[in-house]
Image (tube, grey):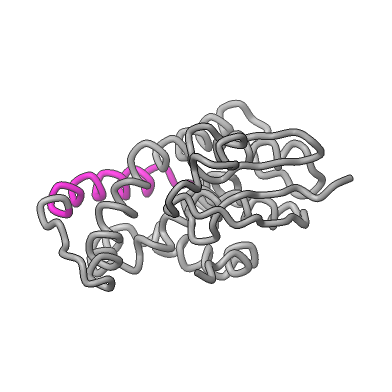
Amino acid sequence: MARPVVHGADYSVYVRIVRMALAEKGVAYDLVPVDIFAEGEAAGAYAALNPFGKIPAFEHDGFRLYETAAITRYVDEGFDGPALQPASPRERAAMNQIVGIVDSYAYRTLVWDIYVETVSKPKDGRPTDAARVAAALPVARTCLAELARLKRPGDWLLGDDLTLADIHLAPVFAYFTKAPAAAGLLGGHPALADWWTRMQARPSFIATEPTS
């Protein structure tokens, strides 16, 4: 059987989510670099893989997918290895709820509005949009408080077993926790902070550390 192919950039949160899922399943894959910020890249040949110009895109034995949540579910269900989704409908719904929170609220707020504005832009000599950061902080507090509330007792977000919820959140935290505001925002949620410490030691997280 052919190796899966992931199209995207290793610095991308969503590319890393897919790569972590593959690593957790023990699946070897090829990463084909795609820089969607390069002029014409998203509108060129890559458009055949994802007409919306987002990364990642995924191929396996002639089967093509885009949208990270669809890809990771396929990876979990289509390959041998430890299950990354709970069997119980309620537990799976709880996992999907966390994935939805990350996609709908946490990613934009924690990565773009906080990390990019307070870390990435100053590093590149660009001014921080202070109003954008100020508006993001209450949303960030809500996101973190809700993730902390939803976290079950145990090492991982849903308890004793790592799931796609953990894999979806970890790359977001990888950027967010570099921001000066992160320590204070996380300080009131010790269980979530402890989860993050464990997540950083996970082999799949270490193996997918961006090089660019």
Q: Quadrant of residue 202?
A: bottom right
Name the spot of residue 122 as percent of width and height, x first. Answer: 22, 70
Task: Locate residue 156, reporting x and y percent.
Answer: 54, 53
Residue 71 in percent (x, y) is at 63, 38
Q: Main secondary structure of the magenta part?
A: helix
Residue at (48, 55) in percent of width and height = 12
Q: Residue at x 55, y 68 (%)?
A: 209
Magenta range is 133-152
- Residue at screen point 37% across, 47% down: 107
Q: In this rendering, would 62 be left or right of 142?
A: right
Q: Quadrant of residue 116?
A: bottom left
Side of 102 relative to 136 (left or right): right
Frontmost residue, 16 versus 10:
10
Q: How far across and down, in percent of the image, does residue 161 sit?
A: 63, 50
Q: Any magenta on residue 17?
A: no
Does the segment drawn in magenta span residue 135?
Answer: yes
Relative depth, front residue between 31 and 36:
36
At 57% across and 70% down in the image, what residue appears?
A: 201
Q: Is residue 176 above or below residue 78?
A: below
- Asked if 92 appears above or below 168 in the picture, the reply is above
